[in-house]
Amino acid sequence: MKVDTYSLISFIILWGLPTFMIVRTYLKMDYNDKRIAINDFRTHRFIFTTGFIILGAFFIHLGLLLNLSILKLIGFVFLTLGGFLSTLNKWNKSKNKSVLVKKIFTYTLIGITTFFLILLGFYYLIIRVGQGEFFQYDNGVTIEVYNSSKQEITDLNFFFSFYSNYDILLDLGNIDKLEPGETTSIYRPHIIGTGNDRSLYFQYPIKKSEKQVDSLAYVASNKPSKVVVIIEITGTDNNGKLLFRAKGFADVHGQFEYDLTSTRE
């Protein structure tokens, strides 16, 4: 998983420094103060208010660092719950405590927590099923190319463009040479949100002065977060066009698979 160095440093400083100071202060306490501190941290009031807020902020920051939507969603759920329960706790303190208030607070807490856990589970399941085997790949653009032919493949260029003109919206990179049996990959963590209904293409030379452009994946979203294409090149036809099969995942349309290993026109 690729992480920006400066973001990683800021994450370590933001979370590492306070953690170090808290641990250092704790170690300097005497035995009785340590027991009091531990007991305070173990109370339901602390866990479901301040604890949830801190945990939510941590997951959101971690999700931003790793560019993982699921972590950001988890963080948002904890942050929202922590803020709501903190407000409810303050309101509860300002009222005359009664058995009814405590029951309402308890059942509300259980209900909200259960609802968000079920919602989170469904969200994860939908993403997991929708992406299938491509769930393991990071957000961004991943292109894997395997040369199963017996010839050397050269000068492959990958880019986003529109069908009408093939003007490059986002250049994803080149593969200069791929030996028989060799596999390589290209990864970009971010997709520039320029234009709807674009496609991911790759271009390569045929014969001496001509070039061929083939579409690999259609991307309907204006701001796609994830595109994965796995390509197996099996050879070339009589005109020099590549014979290949491809499968992958793209936002909106989901999984796809096609086979161009037969002779092309």
Image (cartoon, grey):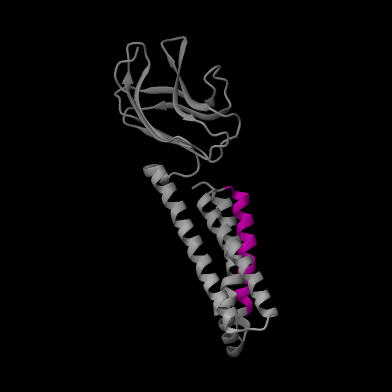
Q: Is residue 252 above or below residue 36?
A: above
- Where is residue 46? Give x, y as percent: 59, 75
Q: Is residue 255 magenta?
A: no
Q: Which residues are magenta?
A: 4-25
On screen, residue 77 versus residue 207, left or right, reads right
- The foreground one among 134 and 19 is 134
- Which residue is at 60% across, 64% downward? 16
Q: Quadrant of residue 36?
A: bottom right
On screen, residue 93 versus residue 165, left or right, reads right
- The foreground one among 51 and 67 is 51
- Which residue is at 54% across, 17% downward? 164
Q: Residue furthest front?
A: 100
- Which residue is at 56% across, 56% downward? 62
Do we see residue 231 in this rendering? no
Q: Is residue 200 above or below residue 16?
A: above
Q: Is residue 93 above or below residue 138?
A: below
Locate the C terminus by quadrant. top left
Q: Quadrant of residue 261?
A: top left
Q: Is residue 187 above or below residue 116?
A: above
Q: Residue furthest right?
A: 94
- The foreground one among 228 and 109 is 109
Do we see residue 119 in this rendering? yes
Count of all numbered marks drawn on residues in the image: 0
Q: Main secondary structure of the magenta part?
A: helix
- Where is residue 207? Give x, y as percent: 41, 10
- Where is residue 195? Give x, y as percent: 59, 29
- Where is residue 213? Give x, y as percent: 46, 18
